[in-house]
Image (spheres, rainbow, N blue to C red):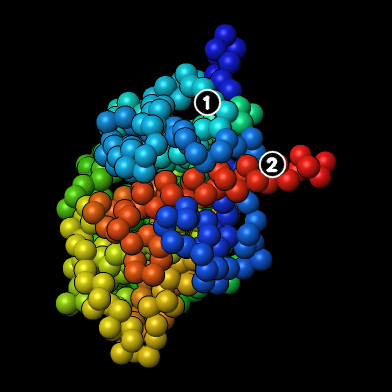
C-alpha cells in the first residue's frame, strides 16, 4: 500500500480546521464572522496537520475518491465554481495499491470509497458488494489506508480534510458513541459488553430492561446490516431490517425493508452479524411528521452547522435509499417552536458532536428528535455525510446559496490561509 520508492510520494496527511473554530472559518465571501454556536475549548485551534500550506489564492485541490462517483463530480463542480483549477482525482483503486503522490500546498479531500466494486473487493475481500459481512476487514484496511495516505500527505506539505483517528472513530460505532458520551453529547443508552451472538444479546437486553433496540454493525454505514429489534414478551419478537438472508446463512443488503418475526430467524441474523462486531443501543421513540418517523441530517462544516434536512420514513430507518424521503424543514422548525424549543437547539447539538472530531473539516450528524420535538439526541456522526444534492445552506450561516461541497471549498480556502499564517508565526517566533 505504500508508495513505491521509485516514485516517491510527497503526499501528506489530511489536516483541517477544528470544528467549533468559529464562523470565520469560511472564506470572507461566505459572510461568516461570528463565533460558532457552542464553540468550546477547542475554538480557534487549528486542526492537526495544518503545516506547510500554500496561500489560498490559486489553491490547488486533490480528491481521493472514485472518479466515476457523483461525490467526486459534485466536489469538482464546486471547486470550479469557486474559480479554482479542476482538482486532481486520485482513484481509491490506485491509492490502495500505493500508486499516489501529493504536492506541497494541495488541499486533499478524502472522500468515500463506496459504490465501486473493485475498491470494495480490495477492502472487504468479496466479489459481491451486496454482501453485509466483511465490515471488520473493510475497517482495518480502510483506516490503515487513510492513516498511511495522510502521513504521506503531511510529509509532502499538503493540507488534508480529515484526521485519520477521527475517521477511525467515526467508523467504529462503539468508539464514536463513547467519545460523544464522554463529551456530554446526548446519545441513546447503549450496551457496553461484548456480544457474541443472539443468546448473549438477549440476556444483556433483558438485564438492561431494553425491549426495543437498534443492532448495528460496528463498522457499517448507510444502514447496512442495521436491525430494529422489538421484543414484547416470550415468543413475541420483530426485527425490521434491509438485510436479506439466504438458506446458507449469508446476508445481503437490499433496498426492501423486511420483517422477521420468529426467534429462530432473528437469532440466525444476529449470529451472522456478531463476528464483525455489533453496537446495540436503545431504540428511542422519534418525532413524527405527516405520520412518518422523522429525524434530521445536519452537515457541520468547519465547526458550523450549515445545512440540514429532515428525513422521514414509514420504517425505523430513515435513509433515503431505503424508501425514506426528505421532509418539511419549515414544518419541523414550527413543531420545535410549538414545543417550546428553538431550532438552534438542533444545530447546537450537531455542532457539539462535530467538535468531538476537531481534525475533520466536514461531518454529517444524525440528530434524533424525541416524540413531541422537545429533546434531541445524536444517533451517529458520519465522516462522509455530505451527499445531499441540491441542498443549499441554512439562512444566517453564511452558506446561503452554497451546497455542502461549495461550503467545504470555501472553508478549505480559509483553512489554508490560517495554516499559512500559523506557519509564518511559528517561523517568526522560532
In which quadrant will I find the C terminus?
top right
Above or below 345: residue 64: above
Marks 1 and 2 sit apart, C-alpha to C-alpha, by 19 Å
Q: Which of marks 2 and 1 precedes in the sequence?
A: 1
Nearest the viewer among 41 and 51 is: 51
Nearest the viewer among 45 and 351 is: 45
Mark 2 closeness class: few <14, some 14–19, many ≥20 residues within 10 Å: some
Q: Position of residue 317 (x, y in %)?
A: 28, 62
The image quadrant that residue 54 belongs to is top right
Image check: 275 left or right of 419?
Answer: left
Q: Position of residue 334 (x, y in %)?
A: 28, 83
Please say whether residue 262 is visible from this viewpoint.
Answer: no
The image quadrant that residue 82 belongs to is top left
Q: Position of residue 270 (x, y in %)?
A: 36, 54
Nearest the viewer among 268 and 274 is: 274
- Extreme-top residue of the structure: 6
Image check: 260 left or right of 337?
Answer: left
The image quadrant that residue 157 belongs to is top right
Disc 1 + disc 2, Cβ < 8 Å:
no
Could you say which disc has been placed on residue 102 in the image? 1
Please say whether residue 78 is visible from this viewpoint.
Answer: yes
Q: Which residue is mark 2?
A: 423
Mark 2 element type: helix
Mark 1 element type: loop
Q: Position of residue 230 (x, y in %)?
A: 31, 70
| Residue that appears at 55% across and 72% down | 38
| Residue that appears at 56% across and 38% down | 55
Above or below 233: residue 39: above
| Residue that appears at 32% across and 55% down | 402
| Residue that appears at 37% across and 39% down | 83
Amino acid at each position: 500500500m505504500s508508495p513505491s520508492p521509485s516514485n516517491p510520494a510527497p503526499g501528506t496527511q489530511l489536516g483541517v480546521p477544528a470544528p467549533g473554530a468559529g464562523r470565520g472559518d469560511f472564506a470572507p465571501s461566505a459572510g461568516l464572522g461570528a463565533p460558532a454556536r457552542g464553540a468550546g475549548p477547542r475554538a480557534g485551534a487549528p486542526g492537526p496537520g495544518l503545516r506547510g500550506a500554500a496561500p489560498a489564492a490559486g489553491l490547488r485541490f486533490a480528491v481521493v475518491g472514485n472518479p466515476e462517483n457523483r461525490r467526486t463530480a459534485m466536489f469538482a463542480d464546486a471547486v470550479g465554481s469557486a474559480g479554482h483549477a479542476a482538482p486532481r482525482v486520485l482513484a481509491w483503486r490506485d491509492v490502495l495499491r500505493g500508486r499516489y503522490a501529493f504536492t506541497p500546498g494541495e488541499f486533499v479531500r478524502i472522500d468515500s470509497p463506496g459504490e465501486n466494486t473493485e475498491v470494495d473487493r480490495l477492502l472487504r475481500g468479496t466479489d459481491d458488494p451486496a454482501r453485509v459481512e466483511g465490515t471488520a476487514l473493510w475497517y482495518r484496511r480502510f483506516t490503515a489506508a487513510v492513516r498511511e495516505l495522510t502521513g504521506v500527505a503531511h510529509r509532502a506539505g499538503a493540507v488534508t480534510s480529515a484526521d485519520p483517528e477521527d475517521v477511525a472513530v467515526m467508523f467504529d460505532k462503539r468508539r464514536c458513541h463513547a467519545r460523544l458520551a464522554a463529551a456530554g453529547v446526548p446519545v441513546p443508552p447503549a450496551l457496553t459488553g461484548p456480544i457474541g451472538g443472539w443468546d448473549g444479546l438477549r440476556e444483556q437486553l433483558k438485564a438492561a430492561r431494553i425491549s426495543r433496540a437498534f443492532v448495528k454493525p460496528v463498522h457499517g454505514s448507510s444502514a447496512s446490516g442495521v436491525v430494529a429489534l422489538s421484543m414484547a414478551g416470550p415468543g413475541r419478537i420483530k426485527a425490521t431490517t434491509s438485510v436479506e438472508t439466504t438458506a446458507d446463512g449469508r446476508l445481503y443488503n437490499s433496498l426492501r425493508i423486511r420483517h422477521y418475526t420468529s426467534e429462530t430467524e432473528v437469532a440466525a441474523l444476529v449470529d451472522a452479524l456478531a463476528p464483525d462486531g455489533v453496537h446495540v443501543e436503545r431504540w428511542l421513540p422519534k418525532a413524527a411528521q405527516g405520520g412518518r418517523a422523522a429525524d434530521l441530517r445536519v452537515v457541520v462544516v468547519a465547526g458550523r452547522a450549515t445545512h440540514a434536512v429532515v428525513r422521514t420514513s414509514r420504517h425505523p430507518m430513515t435513509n433515503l435509499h431505503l424508501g425514506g424521503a426528505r421532509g418539511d424543514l419549515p414544518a419541523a422548525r414550527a413543531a420545535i417552536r410549538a414545543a417550546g424549543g428553538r431550532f438552534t437547539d438542533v444545530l447546537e447539538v450537531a455542532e457539539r458532536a462535530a467538535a468531538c472530531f476537531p481534525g475533520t473539516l466536514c461531518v454529517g450528524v444524525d440528530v434524533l428528535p424525541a416524540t413531541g420535538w422537545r429533546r434531541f439526541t445524536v444517533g451517529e456522526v458520519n465522516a462522509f455525510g455530505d451527499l445531499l444534492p441540491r441542498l443549499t445552506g441554512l439562512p444566517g450561516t453564511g452558506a446561503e446559496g452554497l451546497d455542502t461541497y461549495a461550503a467545504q471549498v470555501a472553508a478549505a480556502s480559509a483553512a489554508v490561509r490560517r495554516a499559512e499564517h500559523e506557519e509564518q508565526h511559528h517561523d517568526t517566533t522560532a
